Image: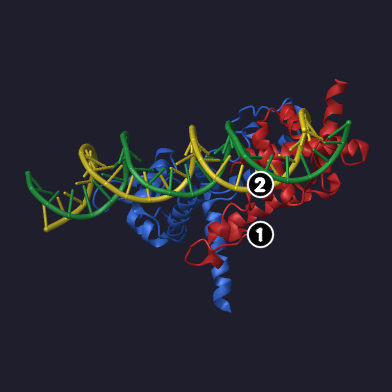
Chain colours: A blue, B red, C yellow, D green
Amino acid sequence: MRLSKRGEYGLRAMIALAEPAEKANAPHMMQIKEIAQREGISAKFLEQILLALKNNGLLHSKMGVGGGYYLARSAGEITLGQIFRVLDGPVAPVKCVSQMAYEPCGCPDEETCGLRLVMGDVRNAIADILDTTTLADVVKRQGTLRKKLSVR
Amino acid sequence: MRLSKRGEYGLRAMIALAEPAEKANAPHMMQIKEIAQREGISAKFLEQILLALKNNGLLHSKMGVGGGYYLARSAGEITLGQIFRVLDGPVAPVKCVSQMAYEPCGCPDEETCGLRLVMGDVRNAIADILDTTTLADVVKRQGTLRKKLSVR
DNA sequence: CAAAAGTCTACTTCTACTATAGACTTTATA
DNA sequence: TATAAAGTCTATAGTAGAAGTAGACTTTTG
């Protein structure tokens, strides 16, 4: 049940973009290099990831000198599920319970397949979290946690 | 977030063994071939899977003529989580939130890493389902569903 | 002893993930 | 208007792990 590096880096980058954007309550532009350095990621690899996010409407970019990437919508309007699906595909553990990319999975009777039932629950549990958590939620949560830790 | 074929076949096989065992309220022995045929799986591949489950204490076996595999404990005492972990490893999407196989994941501050927090939630949601669902639960659920469908 | 079963290990094949490379386009500014 | 700084796009290399195959071995029954 692993999150790929692609997905991990993409999510990290989006959170990194969301943090200053939330603070300023305005889109915040960052360059690939900047993000890559901050997160300790290969810039070339991150480039592909950000490009995919852009081509799927989650990021906007500005080319040329002084360019960079910024969130296409406010952090409160982008869910982790949207990001995840662009980078890692369907959330479902088996295709036969996928809402976004259903495919039969070959059990004799799908309707009464016990494994399918349970995996459906798992899919829903994951999707419930990823589709209701926005970048703004993540940033907020990080913030409260930092405050709490700095007090001690 | 995919379930591997290994995991899928193993879970299917365990459910197949649990079904008659629950009906008879006693361990039920089946041969590799038998299960492989029923589930439409390569017998040689399934062999490795069942062996792993045996070596991890979830199955017992009998060698020689008239031998086969049977559940090491009652279906109500074997959870899907136990099976999953033997075949697919940790449940956690990233190692740094794994309860069973923790490893740092390289974010600058793990304690306040937003991604880690969310992935922790995801891990818990998955583990909650897999670790509380037993083979007996699955068989029961299949049963009620079949009854419901046969009525119409 | 022969046949039927599981045991074990090695190996092959294939796929997908991770990463790198490099040529191209756009834009700001000196 | 030239140059450098940025993103764009596509191809490809490398690798690891998943999926599956093979075959020799052991145990048990009759």
Is there one chain holding both mark 1 and mark 2?
yes
Q: State the image coordinates of residue C12 (x, y, percent, origin top left).
A: 49, 35
Which badge, 1 or 2, comes first in the chain's sequence?
2
> In which image quadrant can residue C5 be found?
top right
Q: Residue at x 83, y 50 (%)?
A: B77
The answer to whether residue A112 is seen in the rendering is no
Task: Tell me: A76 left or right of A124.
Answer: left
Question: Tag 2, which secondary structure?
Answer: helix
Graded by Cα atoms within 10 Å as few (under 14), some (14 to 19) or many (20 or more), the crowding at tag 2 reads many
Q: State the image coordinates of residue B43 (x, y, percent, origin top left).
A: 68, 32
> In which image quadrant can residue A140 be found?
bottom right
Q: State the image coordinates of residue B6 (x, y, percent, origin top left).
A: 64, 40
Q: Residue at x 87, y 27 (%)?
A: B147
Chain letter behind tag 2: B
The amino acid marked with disc number 1 is Met
* Figure check: A146 above or below C4: below
Q: Residue at x 60, y 62 (%)?
A: B102
The amino acid marked with disc number 2 is Leu
Chain letter behind tag 1: B
Q: Residue at x 59, y 72 (%)?
A: A148
Query: Residue beneath label 1, please?
Result: B100
Query: Residue beneath label 2, please?
Result: B87
